Image: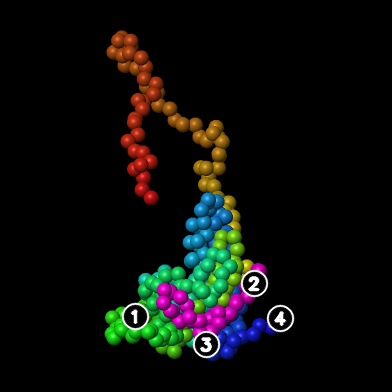
Amino acid sequence: MSVSISPWATDVFGKQALVVQTSLGQALRNMQANAQAAQEQTDSRTNHTYGSARWQGQFERVHEELKDLPGALPVKPFGFPFELMLVGRGLIYPFLYAKTTSDVRTARIPSESRLVKEIFTFAPEPPHVQAVFDLEGFGESMEAVEPRGGLATVPPNTRLVLVPFACNASELLEAHWGVAALGEDRHLMWETGPEPLALPRTVTSHSRRLTSVPVQPASPEREHTSFDGGAQPALTLTSRADVDRQRDIPALTEAEPVEDQTSEDDATD
């Protein structure tokens, strides 16, 4: 089945547009599978583990799928724990926009953080809407945001490519890509797309992941595991003093118990 590539994608990614499109779908499929596996391993009644693994995976799985493309470059924003991928003229930013099937055209960026403001310096300018009353000086106090860290080295002709996806702990629902401006109240104003990304059923792996606990080699002194299989302890016998026998003092067979001065409350996380 042939996959059509829009002119905007070819303009941004060049001849690698189709590979980027396919790789993004694969990265999100891997992200979902890894997050579900992490949730299953914890056997938790909450989805906190899934959410944390999904958030981490949406950046790291994209990095895995795109890192070997010619000219691909990881870019680490200032103060951000993960890298964004720059391929051709496209700076890729994946984000969760919904946990249920929803109209992606109504999607909003999750938060208008400093990172979001910096990466949107590579997005189109939102169209100006003429208000009924234009207030003189309105918007002049808006602080100009300059990219920091790795974003400061990104070429000025770079175009921000958004990859919004919808998923939850049960399933990966849908994904899209396109170019949009950041409008009021974090709403996106799409210039191209959003176009659906194909999500493959097969999960790929680029590294060795732990699927079972390996057998731990036993040291010679721990080969015997039964309670009576170890070495016999050495016992030290001492005779009672004559004065104790004369006074009928009973023999001391065990040391006096020592009260534990610690408790679980003393432990720190």
Q: Residue 143 or 56: which is nearer the viewer?
A: 143
Determine whether 50 is above or below 85 in the image.
Answer: above
> Which range of residues does the magenta coloring cover?
177-202
Task: Identify the secondary structure beneath mark 3.
Answer: helix
For discs 3 and 1, the disc positioned in front in the rendered view = 1
Labelled disc at residue 12: 3
Badge 3 amino acid: Val
Labelled disc at residue 145: 1
Task: Identify the secondary structure beneath mark 4.
Answer: loop
Task: Identify the secondary structure beneath mark 1.
Answer: loop
| Upstream in sequence: badge 3 or badge 2 | 3
Badge 4 amino acid: Met
Residue at which label 2 appears:
200
Contact (CB < 8 A) between labels 4 and 1? no
| Upstream in sequence: badge 3 or badge 1 | 3
Contact (CB < 8 A) between labels 2 and 1? no
View extreme (front): residue = 132
Residue at which label 4 appears:
1
Residue density around tag 1, few if under 14, some if 14–19, many if 20 or more, within 10 Å: few
| Upstream in sequence: badge 2 or badge 1 | 1
Task: Identify the secondary structure beneath mark 2.
Answer: loop
